[in-house]
Image (cartoon, rainbow, N blue to C red):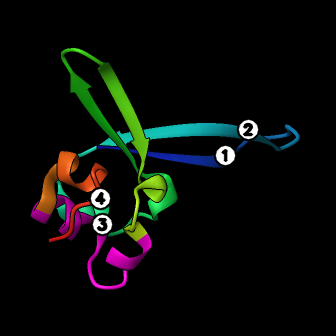
Amino acid sequence: WPWVRNSYCCRGGSGRKKHRVRALIILTTHNPLLLNYTRPEEVRIVRHDPELGTQVTPLHQVQGINELLKEFGIGELWYLLGEQALVEGKKP
């Protein structure tokens, strides 16, 4: 499960003008508790299928995810369903 987050960092040292630099941070985890601190638009589900290759599904595009998130955290859904069932829109 990668957690992709775009953010801005400040660079600059003593006597230098500070400027903002856009950074992309990718964090992978199998820890469901950590996923509970993310937003659906920050999470990508990455699966590998021997025939189809690597597939990436943004969590916020999973059918019915908004309804599920009214009752469960993202980490809870991952733990209860697993990535395949989650992508298929199954319910716990």
Give the residue pinned by disc 4: 89
Give the residue pinned by disc 3: 74
Q: Residue at x 21, y 48 (%)?
A: 83
66 shown above or below 90: below
Query: Contact (CB < 8 A) between labels 4 and 1?
Result: no
How busy is the neighbourhood of tag 1: few (under 14 within 10 Å), some, or many (20 plus)? few
Q: Residue at x 19, y 61 (%)?
A: 32
Helix, strand or loop status at disc 3: helix
Spatial distance from mark 1 to mark 3, Cα to Cα?
27 Å
User: Disc count in the image?
Assistant: 4
| Amino acid, disc 1 | Cys
**Residue 9 horizontal side relative to residue 52, left or right:** right
Q: Which mark is residue 9?
A: 1
Spatial distance from mark 2 to mark 4, Cα to Cα?
37 Å
| Amino acid, disc 4 | Gly
Name of the residue lying farthest toward the left: 80
Which of label 4 and label 1 is nearer to you? Answer: 4
Front one among 13 and 25? 25
Spatial distance from mark 2 to mark 1, Cα to Cα?
5 Å
Q: Which mark is residue 45?
A: none
Disc nearer the start of the sequence (2/3): 2
Q: Residue at x 48, y 54 (%)?
A: 61
